[in-house]
Amino acid sequence: MSSTTAEPVRRPPAARRPTGSRAGHAYLLIAPAVVLVLVFLFYPVLSVFWESLRHHNLTRPLDDGFAGLDNYRALLADELFWRSLRFTAQWVFVEVGLQFVLGLALALVLNRTFVGRGLARALAFSPWAVSGILTTTIWILLYNPTTGIGHYLASMGIGEYGTSLLSEPDTTFWALVIAELWKGIPFFAILILADLQSVPLELYEAANVDGAGPLRRFSAVTWPHIRKAVVIATLLRAVWEFNNVDLLYTMTAGGPAGSTTTLPLYVAQTAIHDQDFGYGSALTVTAFLLLTFASMVYLRISSGDSKEGK
Amino acid sequence: MTRQQHPAEALGRHALSRRGFIRTAAQAGVAMGLASAVSACGGSGGGSGGAVTLQLWDTDTRPERTANLKKLISMFEAKNPGLRINYLGLPTDQYMQKINTAIATRSTPDLLTPKASDLAALVAQNALAPLDERLKKAGLEPQISEQMLKSSRAAAPDGKLYLTPTTSLADVIYYRADWFQEAGLKPPATWADFDAAASRLTDASSGRFGYTLRGGNGFFGQLVQMVYPRAGVSTFFREDGSSTLDDPAVIAACEKYVALFGKQTARSDLTADFKTMVAQFGNGGAAMLSHSIGSYPNHVAALGAEKVGAVAPFPGPDNQVLTGWMTTGFAMFQKSEHQEEAWKFLAYTMEPEGNSFWAQKSGYLPGNKTVAKEKWVTENAAMKAALDAAAKPGVVTLEQPYYLPEFTAITVTDLLPEWQKVLQGNLTPRDFLTAAASALTTAKRKYDKEHG
């Protein structure tokens, strides 16, 4: 009788469940990475959550202590919080919308073949390479009432001396929008152009054969290809613009009369300037939660559209 | 059969020996870290050969200032063999956190350069050593400017001296001396002169305005400078603790100040901060500007000394009120183990040699009266105007309540948008000042209640 007992299959050592000492070894090896993540990622986030539940004002050190939800209750009754939140929404919507539309248009132009395209691309993308502080300095100088473009226009009889786009209630918002667009449009253009270059030319040729016009070619060929890049770019840019502090703080510090104060700017004023870290942390946590929620909703809607599109 | 060693076992054995190595290395690292932390972060120590090393924490780390402070330290060390000072610059936006941590962990240094507005928080924690007795014993008190001594004491909530009256700022009104001369105007000496000159020298069609008004960041200092002296009100609070911002004379003076906006000033002044104002004055856009003596070098660099004149705020109806006398100096910590040595440095900054060097390099008024007579002071139009005004009989210095914990938050963050509404014509000066007075009164009464 031949034996039917099969030879026990030898498993390679790597597939075995590690014994206690080996598991300990593995944990020891990954421990530095885990500690780094915990210390540098989670600790600061958790400390802000904890701070938001405390009274912590550096100018009133003796009043420090656990506050419970006091900071959050104060926030709900704070008119400045609601006003800054409304302005933040307006800022993000207008900035991201215009950056996307103009960035897309720029990418479509730069995707075409023409003489000097390389130079045009380099020039169009150069604002993105300029540092934030330099960007604001350039625009502050341009808007300066005594040394900026307004002064020179006034000397040519256009407009008045002693005025600045950043000081007039009707123009401040748009003056800021233009300054930020200067840097934001290239961001969209770069991402979209990179995706446009991966669209197979055969598809356009086929569309041409089918008699599709420019609009139809865009909606049927171009848009489906760049759609994912646009979703990611708009989300990234929306988060970026939500948290925009450098440009707004340097150019208007939230003024005039608080008309350009975004929520992160209000946080900066409260925590950094007034040294009220407890309330500043509550504002930060609220902004963090709002942003997380908005991002999730946006991604959910975008992925839903994507499935329908398929 | 020789048993072949499994790689993991080999690793394990190796790890055992490595564990010993890691333990030894960690212990050495912790020991070294603690040693360096003790020597670098706070806590002075005795050096070799009986030398004492003091730790100085600086809260204003502009490169030029740091270089000057290090030079002052080396001058002090050369005069005091056996004493060394270690300089440590703190980040401008986080220095109070660092100091508060040091106080909480009892690791404070010996010396500090606090701002007047920091004193309330530091004194509340009993962190600084009072200097009144030491100043008297050293015989330095008669050598120091009375205004500065008063300002230093007024910055602390308990009225004691914690901040050396080493140097001070003071407010002046700068004017374009060449424009005044061309227009046949004398340097302004009264508020009426000021108003007349502001109107006369305004020519909006050529981009020239009589005055530049600070509507943006830091507006409160200019508002106080232009309103309190004109109203002749010399205190920030009445005896009952209520703010004088809603005093009828203050409201009337504020209305005159606001009336300049858009007529004798550029409309863009709505958001003008220090840099914008200085640029406007330096580029021929404004005939007059209110600021502290500290900006005199900026104006001279832009226009030349002959075109820059300076006068102190003009007398009010009853007396002359001086503003902006804000002391800048040094302090020592209560927990310093070398208080005698630390005091030697503080005294040096008020004695002629150290005071002359430090005040001249800072561009501030010197606290030492002898130094105030030196040529570099008397040749500086802004300093001369401030000191001449202070020497007049009956002048009063208006002290701002920096000791109130909420003062900065109220006057900088809360009031700025409201002030801009006033300039835009959407809020009356009366309503603005009434609300501001109410906020400051509440802060003051809360403070008084907490401090008995």
Image (tube, helix red, strand yellow):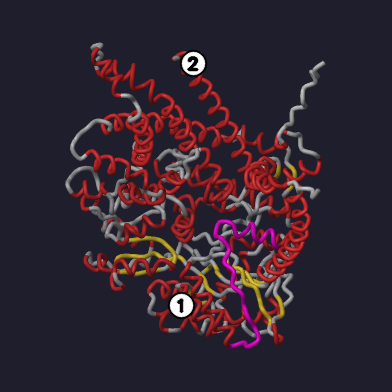
Q: Residue at x 44, y 26 (%)?
A: A228
Q: Above or below — where is A37 with respect to B57?
A: above
Q: Is residue B88 magenta?
A: yes
Q: Residue, x 46% and y 70% (percent of image)?
A: B64
Q: Which residues are magenta?
A: B79-102
In this rendering, do the residues under marks 1 and 2 share a single chain?
A: no
| Outermost top residue | A210
The quarter of the picture where residue B344 lies is: bottom right
What residue sits 31% from the left and 32% below the top?
A: A107
Residue B360, numbered label:
1
Which disc is residue B103 wearing?
none
- The disc numbered 2 marks a residue on which chain? A
Task: Check disc 1 and give the amino acid type.
Answer: Gln
Q: Position of residue A246 (x, y in %)?
A: 45, 46
- Label 1 to label 2: alpha-carbon separation: 72 Å
Q: Chain of mark 1?
A: B
User: Residue flagged by tag 2: what amino acid is it?
Assistant: Lys
| Rendering coords of residue B134 (x, y %) | 69, 79
**Secondary structure found at label 2:** helix
**Quadrant occupied by the C terminus of chain B:** bottom right
Residue A32 versus residue B177: which sits nearer the camera?
A: A32
* Left or right of B399 on screen, residue A218: left
Residue A307 shows which numbered tag? 2
Whether residue A262 is visible: yes
The reply to whether residue A169 is visible in this rendering is: no
> Could you say where residue B96 lies in the image, as x and y percent from the top left?
62, 59
